[in-house]
Image (tube, rainbow, N blue to C red):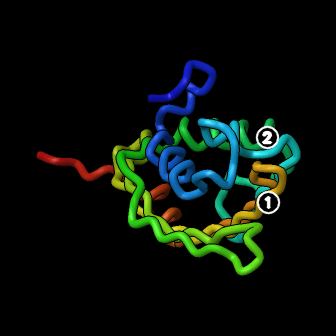
Amino acid sequence: MIDPPYAAYEAAAPYFDLIRRAVGDLVDGEHFFDVVSDDIVYEVLYELPGWPRSLKGRRDLMAAFRGYVDNIALQSAGELIVHKTDDGGGIVIEYEVRGTIIATQVNYENRFCSIIRFENKKIVYWRDYMDSLAAWNALVARAEIVP
């Protein structure tokens, strides 16, 4: 269940829960937005209309995710694999999400690989890779008309 301050992000709860599980005791805080630093750098190495390539700060990250949850409702996130870095200051995670494009009710499935760095028990850096074509196909697909 999402805490009241984050209730607007309920559609991404499976993702937030998976990430919180992945980072475990490497960070302090309960919710995804609690475990990122105020000045996090969040980069995405893909082109997706409406999502910036780089965000700086928790506030901008929260605003970007607000757009995400206005368009995609996740039903699950799983297939988590966590790789710890040799220096102990980060992890690399692989995972999948499944959901629905809200406007069209088209199924959405995607795979991700994220590189995460920590300082002072907070996430300070995030670099994200995903299957851009899967996202694009889901976003531009039209709902099937069932007779």
- Secondary element at tag 2: helix
* Amino acid type, mark 1: Tyr
Residue nearest the observer in this picture, 128 or 100 = 128
Mark 2 or mark 1: which comes first in sequence? 2
Q: Which residue is mark 1?
A: 125
- Counting other residues with Cα less than 10 Å from the Cα at mark 1, is it few (<14), some (14-19), or many (20 or more)? some
| Vertical position of residue 79 compared to residue 87: above or below | above
Q: Quadrant of residue 54?
A: bottom right
Give the residue at x 54% y 58%.
22
Residue nearest the observer in this picture, 38 or 137 = 38
Q: Is residue 132 visible?
A: no
Residue nearest the observer in this picture, 9 or 68 = 9
Q: Is residue 55 visible?
A: yes
Image quadrant holding the N terminus, namely top left
Total labels drawn: 2
Q: Residue furthest bottom?
A: 86
Residue 111: which numbered mark, if any? none
* Amino acid type, mark 2: Arg
42 on left or right of 112:
right
Residue 75: give x, y in percent of width and height.
Answer: 36, 46
Q: Are marks 2 and 1 in contact (CB under 8 Å)?
A: no
Give the residue at x 83% y 50%.
120
Give the residue at x 69% y 37%.
34
Residue nearest the observer in this picture, 27 or 33 = 27
Q: Quadrant of residue 38?
A: top right
- Secondary element at tag 1: strand
Residue 58: which numbered mark, if any? 2
Residue 72: give x, y in percent of width and height.
Answer: 48, 44
| Vertical position of residue 1 compared to residue 121: above or below | above
Residue 146: give x, y in percent of width and height.
Answer: 16, 47
Give the residue at x 48% y 71%.
81
